[in-house]
Amino acid sequence: MAAEKAAEILRAGGLVALPTETVYGLAANALNAAAVEKIYQVKGRPSVNPIIVHVAGINGAKRCASAWPSAASLLAEAFWPGPLTIVLPKTEIIPPIVTAGGGTVGIRWPSHPFMQAVIHRCGFPLAAPSANLSNQVSPTTAGHVARTLGDKISLIVDAGPAAVGIESTVVDLSSGAPVLLRAGMISSAQLAGVLGSLKTPAAAEGAVLKSPGQLARHYSPRARLIVLDWENERHLKAQLQLHSIPPDRAHVIAHDKIPADCGCARVSLIPEDPEAYARALYSELHVSDDLGAEWIVVEQVPPTAEWEGIRDRLKRASAPR
Ligand code: TXA
Ligand code: MG
């Protein structure tokens, strides 16, 4: 059985690419420093970037955290299992390599049944960043993982496309007032609804350094990505010209005003509701990269709360190099 095969490799200190509901993860035994070291090597991940620890239940989470504030209970009750990572002070069992030497650990109880089955079989938590080379677009299918890491890991478990499609929301509860470290499909409005209040990165500048996922350029395709808003096709063409983007080198990702004849190399339609959009976005970026697009032109998305995780990823993917 695939879950047992994965657990066997993990028990022996190896790496396995596993499906989660957000994106595919590159997992190792979180309690085995030598195993976690392999994650950094395979991904080319900077050693300053801590790794999320995945558990399969509240008790598993409490083994990793030396404090369990009431806010943690509230968040776990509302959003676990699911796409939320909670940062708390770590216990002794978590080796420093997992937390990049820091005293806090990011903990997530994912909802994906396969991931849960593997964690149960292992009996230890799994350290797992997204299963991509550092700074590249996260994988939402097993195929995305295979393309960049296929020759570096012995098992990639294919469970179809990820249901959420962008990485988990990260909230820091380690220093008093809750701080949003990374936006995601669980919005800050939802979190504030449960917690009463939440500091966002703009309000807590220190958070920018606390979570490397906050670095401006991250989650980037090879192609240059730009977000534009257009009224009609003429307006789009004029903007491409303004930004010196040759249409025949540009792939357009649109969800509302679909250009029919902009001379672009490719136009893809992506669903207009935020959940379906998030599920489709990274696949579209992977396709454009695979086809050798020079530019990816993404239609601006709505300013509302349900889109904040998507806006965050588009902003990072379009940050100057
Ligand atoms: O949805 C996800 O979170 C996926 C799946 C596999 O669970 N994982 C993921 O991992 O996106 P990664 O390594 O690509 O991103 C982890 C983010 C980074 O921004 C990291 O800095 C932050 O979580 N993080 C992890 N531990 C932290 C800690 N102790 N303090 C602050 N930020 C932390
Ligand atoms: Mg990542």
Image: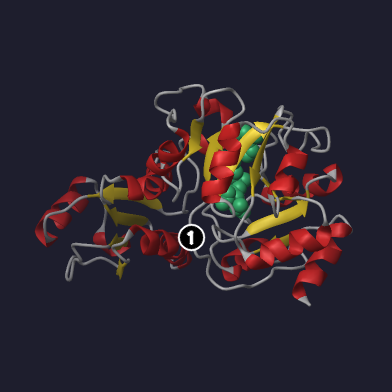
Give coordinates of residue 232: x percent, y percent: 11, 59
> Disc 1 marks which residue?
164
Outermost residue, bottom side: 1
Which residue is at the front of the view, 190 or 18? 190
At horizontal 56% and vertical 68% (from top left) the residue drawn is: 141
Residue 193 visible in rendering: yes
Query: Given the image, on which type of amino acid does mark 1 rest?
Result: Val
- Residue positioned 10% across, 58% down in the render: 234
Badge 1 density bin: few <14, some 14–19, many ≥20, Cα 10 Å: many
Residue sitting nearer the eye, 187 or 46: 187
Under circle 1, the secondary element is: loop
Instruction: Work out which quarter of the rendered image holds the N terminus and state it.
Output: bottom right
Which x, y percent locates residue 106?
64, 39
Asked whether residue 134 appears in the rendered view, the answer is no
260 on left or right of 132: left
Quadrant location of the C terminus? top left
In the visual, does 101 lie left or right of 268? right
What's the image's color scheme?
A: secondary structure
**Is residue 40 placed above or below 104 in the rendered structure?**
below
Residue at image x 47%, y 63%?
286
Is the shortest distance between ligand 1 and the CB of mark 1 under 8 Å? yes
Q: In front here: 50 or 181? A: 181
